[in-house]
Image (cartoon, rainbow, N blue to C red):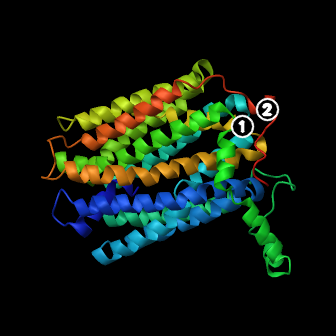
Amino acid sequence: MVIPAITDVTMSALCPGEDECSLAIYLSGFQQAIIGLGTLVIMPLVGNLSDKYGRKALLTVPMSCTVIPLGILAYSRTRNFFYVYYVAKTLTAMVCEGSVHCLALAYVADNVPEARRASAFGILSGICSSAFVCGTLSTRFLSTSSTFQVATSVAAVAAVYMRVFLPDSIIDANLSTPILSKEKLNVAESEKGSTKKMQLFKTMPSLDDMIALLKTSPTFSQAAVVAFFSNLADVGLHASMLYYLKAQFHFSKDQFADLMVISGIAGTISQLLIMPLLAPALGEERLLSIGLLFSCAHMFLYSIAWSVWVPYAAAMFSILIVFAQPCMRSIVSKQVGADEQGKAQGCISGICSFSNVIAPLAFSPLTALFLSARAPFNFPGFSIMCCGFATMVAFIQSMMIRGIPISSHRNSNCNHMEP
């Protein structure tokens, strides 16, 4: 809900009355880089802990923290409150950014057989896309203040719903240890507290653990490369596109919402109806390559947009772009055992977080430069075209992925991290 509105809020707080604001671009890029550094550490830890304590317990933290920054802008969007939001968003997003999606993927992998996992991941992404469409549609018809108030309420309801109705997917007592129960709190207060802390530190994955996990199979390492470059391009695109469209075509909240609704509807239809049919027939590898190819074309078209209708046409490419992420996550899930899904998804999310650090540092200054009067040559969409080249690298790597081994047919060799 807040994505179409946040650009206008940022611009009005920092550069009121202007269509181009380098300060807003740099602050957004800096925030994304700091969040990326935090999630680089947190994501593998969250995934690893969820394998031991359960998905539901770990979901509670990010879903609760998400409410805080939204509530700040729901109260006021003046310059001072924007800076308070900026700090709160940065701190909470270090834990929240990507955690819910990572744990949701691990949850699905817990409950769906390998043969149906690609379709299930696609359906999960389709449901997320439909929620995105509903959110952006509501933003289109709500005022800015109402948008943040409703978003805060929805985030709070989601957290309560999850705690009340979601059953935990880990039901084996040997694998699951509740961390939010009274018994756990009593143990933490007893003389066994230090022992528990030592076990927690042992659970934290190190760089060697991550490297060992990447070496479990060539397919896993190839998928990690695809994840890095595709996410690098996606983050760079999102960091640049809204400011680019505002500077070039004077887009506002309503136009951003329209654009995202088109993209969301196309992605929802594709993931819910088309992907479940194509995944068994073509396989995850081919669908991954198709999604990345059209993602590359989509970015190139954005970068050379010559009229206001071109971004709307480019948004329709989402009907095929959306194949990439669920297929890549499905490929990864098949490389590890049933008790390592959180670990594997957390590792890939950590790699994506690393690209979240690099992308703003690379693309935000480039966007600010080429949207300003100091540009070395007249190409406002140059940074977006560079994102397209990063996607091309991911596409080339995806073409090399062959022969996905099914984890249930092999002995897992991911014993590098203690449970």
Q: Residues within 10 Å of mark 2 (few under 14, many from 20)?
A: some
Residue appearing at x 47%, y 33% in the figure: 394
Image position, residue 66 (x, y; %):
51, 64
Residue appearing at x 73%, y 41% in the figure: 111
Residue 377, picture quadrant: top left
* Furthest residue toward top: 281
Q: Nearer the viewer, mark 1 or mark 2?
A: 2
Quadrant occupied by the N terminus? bottom left
Image position, residue 179 (x, y; %):
75, 67
Amino acid beneath label 2:
Ser
Quadrant occupied by the C terminus? bottom right
- What distance separates the C-alpha of mark 1 from that of mark 2? 13 Å
Q: Is residue 317 visible?
A: no
Q: Which residue is mark 1?
A: 112
Disc 2, SS = helix
* Furthest residue toward front: 208
Amino acid beneath label 1:
Val
Image position, residue 237 (x, y; %):
35, 44
Residue closer to the observer: 419 or 58 = 419
Q: Is residue 399 visible?
A: yes
Q: Which residue is mark 2?
A: 408
Indicate whether 347 appears above or below 10: above
**Side of 19 where 231 appears, left or right:** right
